[in-house]
Image: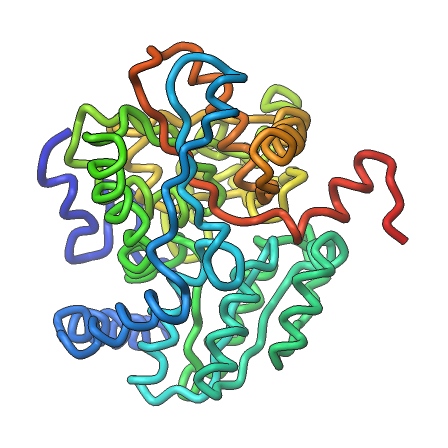
Amino acid sequence: MKDDTLQYPDSRGHFGPYGGRFVAETLMEPLRQLEEAYAQFKADPKFQAELDFDLKHYVGRPSPLYPADRMTKAWGGARIWLKREDLNHTGAHKVNNTVGQALLAKHLGKTRIIAETGAGQHGVASATIAARLGLKCVVYMGADDIERQSPNVYRMKLLGAEVVPVTSGTRTLKDALNEAMRDWVTNVDDTFYIIGTVAGPHPYPMLVRDFNAVVGREVIVQSREQIGRLPDALVACVGGGSNAIGLFHPLLGFPEVKMYGVEAGGDGVETGRHAAPLSAGKPGVLHGNRTYIMADENGQIQGTHSISAGLDYPGVGPEHSWLKDQGRVQYTAINDDAALASFHECARIEGIIPALESAHAVAYAKVLAPTMRKDQNIVVNLSGRGDKDIFTVAKHDGISLG
């Protein structure tokens, strides 16, 4: 990979042929203002000090790099390490990004924030920060996701957020994002849209990546301290792609570190019931940017399926599309059954209940580890905890929780 690839996006918000701004004219100026404000605050030592303080004292960073020795022994091959984003305040990596965006909202004088959510973790993180800063919060969530993520819905309401069910389309994350964009067009003067992933129009893919890159920066320091060198491989699940790009981006300049992004294979990519645009999609435009999407021959967005609400999305962040084309990151898919098996296995072997999203990454690490030497190391991004998924898993297992 050329070194200049690390400088993406370019001045127009493009990662090679991907990214950009494909939005209504009414949003062009707010996006330009956001880009300018972000550039200003990114270079402001006071803003960075405020962000660092919140990440340490409110989020609880750095998150541990945990040696999963029993898992390693069970699987054979490379040693497995878990980057414990599940231990962050609110239980996932999403809070890294919402803290940063909420600080931007506060400095820009916004009084209302909106967010979209699939698994509910981004909604919870947004509601949490809004409560702390005294901002009104509205979260859009697909009606189907509300049903399968009821614990997180109640958490958002406890935090004072209004949760708006989205009943259009597939009633999942894609449609929640559509509704949030419509809200922002209408209320742009007082509203800040906290996007939950590295998708959307420029500057969001860059902005969200930068805030979540704290994960990869920590892994560089921690792996050198605990392993004595950088890991040989990184593994992370990919829906929109924020947890993965946060891990990958700071290490892109180290070609010896291999990277694997794991999409939701659903019932199997060959069945068409999946959420794996990088594995089986094609370039197109979705939610304000050009990227790999799941679409039919007429360009219409296809329905998706994953047992994991957070991965149930027909697109992906544009930087992931660029990294796929460049061959820097290898993308694959894990189906529902394998993710569920790893959900149970991680719980029983390591005493850690992972999010169903993260279980996809764990499942691929189980495939990858035996192909590597015992003196090699894999870091798996455990992007969130599985409390939110217990009703989904119990239902799948035929267990009633009342």
Q: Quadrant of the N terminus?
A: top left
Q: Quadrant of residue 300?
A: top right
Q: Residue at x 49, y 79 (%)?
A: 130
- Position of residue 100 relative to residue 389, above or below, is below
- How far across and how far down the image is residue 66, in percent? 41, 39
* Closer to the camera in the image, 294 or 35: 35
x, y percent for residue 330: 35, 25
Residue 83 against residue 232 in the figure, above or below: below
Residue 261: where, in percent of width, then height? Answer: 41, 32
290 lies left or right of 393: left
Task: Please give the name of the residue rendered at 33% of the width and 66% of the height, measured from the top-left corner.
Answer: 56
Which residue is situated farthest in the left direction here? Answer: 3
Please report the residue visible at 57 percent of the width from the left and 53 percent of the height from the top.
Answer: 174
The answer to whether residue 300 is visible is no
Q: How is the image coloured?
A: rainbow
Please give the name of the residue rendered at 75% of the width and 45% of the height, measured from the top-left corner: 392
Relative side of 282 to 156, left or right: left
- Relative image position of residue 257 (x, y in whole percent): 24, 27
Residue 324's quadrant in the figure?
A: top left
Q: Tally the marks.
A: 0
Q: Nearer the viewer, residue 313 or 100?
A: 100
Q: Is residue 340 visible?
A: yes
- Kindly indicate the quadrant of the structure image that contains residue 360: top right
